[in-house]
C-alpha cells in the first residue's frame, strides 16, 4: 500500500494558547473538530473541510494531569519540546506574500526570506511558538512584483529581521 500524502503533523507544545494564535492568526488555519482525547490540544484545518482530520495537531501537556497524554503518546521530557528536534522544518505552499509579511511584522515574529529562482519560489522561514521551523513557499512573482513596486533592487534575496 503506497503512501499517498502527508496526513498531518503534530506539535507537542507547552503553550497551547500561543500555538493556536500562531497557526490560526498568522498562518490562517481554522480550528475544528478534535476527538475527546484525555489531554488538551487542538486540530487545525485548511479552510472549512474537516474530512482530512486536520493538517496540524497541537498536543498540549496538562501539568496537573499528564497521564492521559503519557498513556496515548508516551512521555517526553518538557525540555526536549523546543525546536524541530530531528525534523528540520515543515513546508507549505502559500499565496499573498505581502499579507503574510504584514501579519508576521504585526505579530513581532522574526523571519527569514529568500527567493530560489530555479524553483520559482520565494521562501519565508518562521518559527512557531514551540520553536518548530515553518517554511512558507510563495510564487516568486509575488516577491518580484513587491520589489518592483518598492523600487528595492533584489530585496527578495535579503533576510528580514
Image: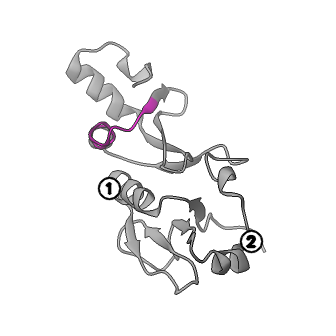
Observer-nearest residue: 63 or 6?
A: 63
Observer-nearest residue: 75 or 99?
A: 75
> Dot 1: few (<14), some (14–19), or many (≥20) neighbours within 10 Å?
some
Name the quadrant of the C terminus. top left
Q: State the residue position of label 1.
A: 25
Residue positioned most to the front: 64
Nearer the viewer's eye, disc 2 or disc 1?
Answer: 2
Q: Which mark sits nearer the N-terminus, 2 or 1?
A: 1
Decide: is 160 above or below 61: above
**Residue at x-position 25% and y-position 20%:** 148
Residue positioned most to the right: 1
On the image, the x and y values in percent for residue 70 come to 70, 75
Q: State the residue position of label 2.
A: 74
Q: Quadrant of residue 14?
A: bottom right
Decide: is 26 above or below 1: above
Residue positioned most to the left: 149
Label 1 element class: helix
**Residue at x-position 58% and y-position 84%:** 38
Magenta span: 101-112
Q: How is the image coloured?
A: one colour
Name the quadrant of the N terminus. bottom right
Label 2 element class: loop
Decide whether residue 106 is among the magenta residues: yes
On the image, the x and y values in percent for residue 46 come to 41, 65
Observer-nearest residue: 59 or 33?
A: 59
Amino acid at each position: 500500500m503506497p503512501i499517498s500524502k502527508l496526513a498531518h503533523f503534530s506539535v507537542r507544545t507547552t503553550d497551547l494558547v500561543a500555538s493556536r494564535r500562531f497557526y490560526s492568526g498568522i498562518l490562517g488555519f481554522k480550528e475544528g473538530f478534535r476527538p475527546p482525547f484525555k489531554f488538551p490540544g487542538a486540530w487545525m484545518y485548511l479552510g472549512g473541510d474537516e474530512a482530512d482530520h486536520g493538517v496540524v495537531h497541537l498536543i498540549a501537556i496538562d501539568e496537573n494531569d499528564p497521564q492521559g497524554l503519557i498513556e496515548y503518546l508516551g512521555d517526553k521530557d518538557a525540555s526536549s519540546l523546543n525546536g524541530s528536534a530531528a525534523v528540520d522544518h515543515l513546508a507549505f505552499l502559500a499565496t499573498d506574500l505581502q499579507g503574510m509579511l504584514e501579519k508576521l511584522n504585526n505579530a513581532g515574529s522574526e523571519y527569514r526570506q529568500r527567493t530560489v529562482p530555479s524553483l520559482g519560489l520565494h521562501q519565508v522561514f518562521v518559527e512557531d511558538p514551540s520553536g518548530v521551523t515553518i517554511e512558507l513557499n510563495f510564487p516568486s512573482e509575488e516577491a518580484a512584483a513587491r520589489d518592483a513596486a518598492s523600487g528595492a533592487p533584489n530585496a527578495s534575496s535579503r533576510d528580514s529581521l
